[in-house]
Amino acid sequence: MTVQSTEAGTAARYLRLFEPGQRLGWTYRDPESLRSPFPEPEPQRPPSPVAYQNRAQAARLRHEDSKGTTVKIGGGISLLLLLLTTVGGTLMVLLAVIAAGATTALVLTAGRAAAQADAQLESKTTELEKHFQYTWHSWHQRGLQHTEAQDQWINGLDAWGAVPAEPGTRRLDVFGGSQRSREGFLTVFGTSTLQQQPLIVVDLTQALICEELCAVAGLAGVPVDVQLLPSRMAESGIASGLTPQELVDSLVEAVYAEDSEANRAARALDTRILQQLCAVLGAEVTPARLGAGLRALMGEIDDTEALTRAERNRIADDLLGDKNKDQMRDGLLRLASFLHPLERLGAERGGRGPGYLTCIALDFTVGSASTELLGDLAVQSVTRRLASFPEAAPSVVLALGERGLQRRYLEQLAAVCERRGAQLTVLHPHLREGAEEVIGSGTVGFMKLGNHREAGIAADFLGRHHSFVLHSLTDTEGTTVSTSVAKTVGSSLSEGTTYSESVSRGSNWGTSDTYQGGFNPFPASSSSSSGGSYSKTTGTSTSTTYTTNESTTHTTGDSQSTSLARGQQRVYEYAVEPTQLQALADFSLLLVERRPDGSVTVHPADCNPNVVLLDRVSTRPLPYTA
């Protein structure tokens, strides 16, 4: 059991499980995550006013300027007057004193102006500092008040809240989990259901996971009817309350449970035999009387008092002919074999009716065919009683075991619950075979699924979505050093011959006249001359030039490169990975909500009933979310 000690100190707290509101578990929310910071920013110390700073700086500069200028001019005048005292006498001395006094007065006046400006600046700065201190202390007090109010509000919030069942939920299938976690879920869900309507629990796990629910219901004073099969089948009421026809149909269905394709003729024949027996037995039809009737029909000795002598004789002599008995002996023997372990079913029930909480549970029996038959009969009995229930149908919880349940039985029960408006909750230990075929018939929840194939099926049901993921990351860093040396050697030889020739020619002529003196205009004598010249020059020159050159070139290169590249790709991945379903905590429950647009929202819950013992736990949904 997951419930801790139920002594008087904790019993009252467990009774909170019965507070109104149907719950599937709990959800945790850290109240500190709702704390809101103080919205007002911290006030900042204001700087000294610029205007006052400028005035003070200007006054100090004027003081320095006037002090220097006045001292120089006034000192110079006073010195000049003192030098003229030898000429002016006492008058010059007096003028020098007056000039010195005037100079001092001017310097003092400028100093007072500067001091006054500094005093105004200091006064204004002090005033602003006082205002800042007042503002900061006021802000600090408001911050403390805000923090205190937040502390009071958060301390009053609940850390745990209920995960409610969706309004109008008619079918809930929970897959996976351990016996302990399914026991916790049944306790949390069952107690909250009992607050609003009766509850029938069919526990086929052979681990008695309904024991905890019965214990807590007993603490709350809820009328509880526990029927353990097969150890206490005599106190069971699965056969009582059924009409003879319903009892016959339930028995035949249970006998042929393993063979869904059973011969209809065999089923019809068994049904007819049992109906004929019921006609002889009258209104009081029980498994014990049916078993005794089958033995009487086969001619076996029966030392029980289930039948009267008249009933036994009528069955043995009038019900079937001898030829038919021989032909049907195998079928009769099969029916008798199935009914024999059930003959004490309901023998000590008396007139006790069902409780507000009815738990029909299989206890642990290894390899017992009667146990399997009782399980099938229990489901058939609940199905048929719901179909004819005179009042509002109770809620039904069916906890399947490792053996599972025939799909047609589950569908019959679901159809009856749907028709009667009864809520049906089915706890499947695995997500395989028949469970895989019914997933999605209603609201779905997943507990820990250890098997990887089952986790994969659940992940496929939850669906997939697109996302961008980092698929490659490249980081490259390199350094390249290169050195080259080139040497060049060359030579050249050139030879040349130059030939030159020059020729010069020349000619000259002249006339001269000689005159006598006086008035004779004619020359006394006349002479003329002419001449010429010719020259020719020839020259030859030869030159040879030889040139040699040599050069060496050194080249060095150094380079460094770094690159970082990221690559993303669009992937289609599970909304919930199979490994996450395999790694769920023991009491974790994932409730699946499918929205109209096809998207899936998963609501986590904790179905440990001991959460109610913690502080700051609400049995209603949390009004705030983080």
Image (tube, rainbow, N blue to C red):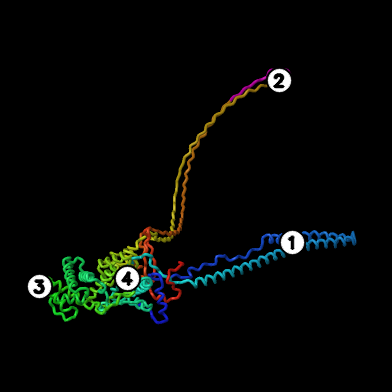
Alpha-carbon distance for marks 1 and 2? 112 Å
Return the residue nearer the eye: 168 or 551: 168
Q: Earlier in the sequence, mark 3 or mark 2?
A: 3
Which-is-in-front pick, marks 1 and 2? 1
Q: Secondary structure at mark 2?
A: loop
Return the residue nearer the eye: 282 or 589: 282
**Magenta-colored stretch includes residue 526:** yes
- Tell me the kind of residue under disc 2: Gln
Contact between labelled residues 1 and 3, with CB atoms less than 8 Å apart: no
Contact between labelled residues 4 and 2, with CB atoms less than 8 Å apart: no
Q: Earlier in the sequence, mark 1 or mark 4?
A: 1
Q: Which mark is residue 64?
A: 1
Residue at the spot of label 2: 516
Q: Which mark is residue 334?
A: none
- Tell me the kind of residue under disc 3: Asp
Q: Residue at x 29, y 75 (%)?
A: 360
Q: Earlier in the sequence, mark 4 or mark 3?
A: 3
Alpha-carbon distance for marks 2 and 4? 178 Å
Q: Secondary structure at mark 1?
A: helix
In magenta, the rendered stretch is 515-530
Q: Earlier in the sequence, mark 3 or mark 1?
A: 1
Q: Earlier in the sequence, mark 1 or mark 2?
A: 1
- Placement of 168 over or under 540, stated as above or below: below
